[in-house]
Amino acid sequence: MAAVGKFHLSAHKLPCFARYSLNFILGAGQVDGEILETLWAPFNKISPTARSMSQAHRQEILDDHMRNSNWKKLVGIGKCLYIRHNDKLI
């Protein structure tokens, strides 16, 4: 099943919308579909340094940055859910 993220879909031709939009895929939910874009953005900051590293060192650095990103999400999800829940009650 092919789909195009909502951010990139607007750059496609109009016929692509009905065929590849996440809005029309059963079970897709209301997400932007651009999670990889948000994960790669911080890597742009370290990429000049990582280019000069060996393959093993580069992999270790990228893994460390990804783990740090996941840890920040894990630690912050409680607060995020609490705020969203309280916003729904108001």
Image (cartoon, rainbow, N blue to C red):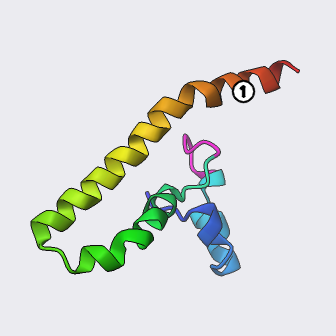
Q: Is residue 11 left or right of residue 27?
A: right
Q: Quadrant of residue 87?
A: top right
Where's residue 25, x and y in %? Answer: 57, 50
Residue 43 lies in the magenta stretch: no
Disc 1 is placed on an element classified as helix
Q: Quadrant of residue 13?
A: bottom right
Q: Residue at x 59, y 65 (%)?
A: 19
Residue 28 lies in the magenta stretch: yes
Q: Residue at x 55, y 45 (%)?
A: 28
Where's residue 34, x and y in %? Answer: 54, 59
Q: Nearer the viewer, residue 61 or 10?
A: 61
Where's residue 85, x and y in %? Answer: 72, 22
Q: Nearer the viewer, residue 87 or 19?
A: 87
Give the residue at mark 1: 83
In the rendered structure, which amino acid carries the disc numbered 1? Ile
Q: Residue at x 45, y 60 (%)?
A: 36
Q: Quadrant of the N terminus?
A: bottom left
Q: Quadrant of the C terminus?
A: top right
- Point out the stretch of residues depicted in magenta: 24-30
Query: Measured along the vertical axis of the image, is residue 4 above or below residue 76?
Result: below
Q: Residues within 10 Å of mark 1 (few under 14, many from 20)?
A: few
Q: Is residue 47 left or right of residue 51?
A: right
Q: Is residue 90 left or right of residue 39?
A: right
